[in-house]
Image (cartoon, coloured by chain):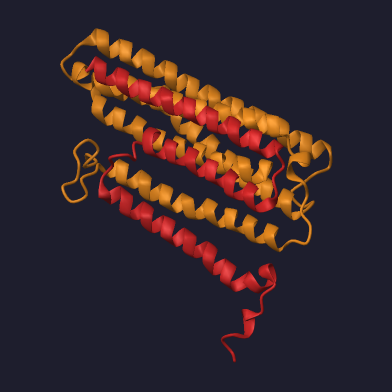
Chain colours: A red, B orange
Amino acid sequence: MAHDVATQVRGYMLVFGALLVLTLATVGMSYLRLPETPAIVIGLGIALTKASLVAMYFMHLKGEKPMVYWPLGLTAFLFIGLLVSVLLAEGDHLFGTQFGDAFTR
Amino acid sequence: MEIPYTTDVRPDTGLTNPKLGIWLFLASEVMLFGSLFSSYALLRSGAPTWPVQHEILSVPLAALNTVVLIASSVTMVMAWASLAPHIAAVRSGNRDEEARSLGRYRLFMGLTLLGGAIFLVVKTIEYSDKFSHHLYPATNNFLGLYFTLTGLHAVHVIVGMIVNAYLWGPGARMWHREPERFTNRIEVAGIYWHFVDVVWIFLFPVLYLL
């Protein structure tokens, strides 16, 4: 039992170390002053990795029941839908396209 | 009347009610913060100009806050890990182990509370600095988004700290009577606290670094 706890605690410390390294990386990256698109992709990519580590290991999501995965999966899908619907509605104004009249023609 | 399925899992979901409940609640919170994040994306991508965020906000202070919150997540999970292996011992009347595990739990939960407090102090310093330079939510879209997002997040930190403080103090009496139910409470409170950490993990690069 004590051995299991030690393994678990060691796991938490490893995740903590990884999170600190990733935090350092994301701050360091910002000083490179990359152009917009790579900066967003890398910045959010690192954030997603950190969030996944916290979710999987601290929140015990790794090995959780389907009853937890399915609502979370649905949430992720709906959230992406939210972002996409906003982009579709405002896309012309953002990307300089001319699709606004497509439905009325 | 006893609340069902606080320690036994429901046969249909395979989960305890609190575990399912907190995840469903967090799903709703994802939509709340998600809508604000997508507002940021829309407003920024559509704006002709946007302030240079790291020239207005302090990256070192926010980086410190990031490390503080991550550390508090570690201590929170350690608080749970201080209890979980010792439930059987409490049930079998091992008073020594009961007291020692409670002590370790109180240490780690206390450190979690300390982390939350440090985070809020740093946030207060940041906000006062903005106000003293006449930078308010109404000043421009970026500041409106910054104060709304971090303000809502700070409210979540405060609420989490109130719950954690109760579980550190009077709530901890449950360890003696119903150790498994208490441990599950710590796990569920921890899942909420980790979520607050995850939101900040996204807020930090989006508001400070990009």
Query: Where, by quadrant of the figure, is residue B3 drawn?
Result: top left
Residue at image coords 54%, 51%: B33
Report whether B76 appears left or right of B154: left
| Residue B32 vertical placement versus B129 (above, below) | below
Q: How many marks?
A: 0
The residue closer to the viewer here, A41 or B187, is A41
Report whether A90 appears left or right of A9: right
The residue closer to the viewer here, A80 or A18, is A18
Q: Residue furthest right?
A: B133
Residue at image coords 47%, 51%: B30
Report whether B50 appears left or right of B186: right
- Asked if residue B189 shows in the view, the reply is no
Residue at image coords 66%, 29%: B122
The quarter of the picture where the C terminus of chain A appears is bottom right
Q: Residue furthest top?
A: B96
The residue closer to the viewer here, B188 or B77, is B77
The quarter of the picture where the N terminus of chain A appears is top left
Residue at image coords 54%, 35%: B158
Query: Where, by quadrant of the figure, is residue B192 drawn?
Result: top left
The residue closer to the viewer here, B180 or A100, is A100
Q: Position of residue B154 (x, y in %)?
A: 59, 39
Q: Position of residue A40 (x, y in %)?
A: 62, 49
Q: Position of residue B120 (x, y in %)?
A: 62, 31
Report whether B75 appears left or right of A101: left
| Residue B107 vertical placement versus B204 (above, below) | above
Q: Position of residue B5 (x, y in %)?
A: 22, 41
| Residue A60 vertical placement versus B87 (above, below) | below
- Asked if residue B201 shows in the view, the reply is yes
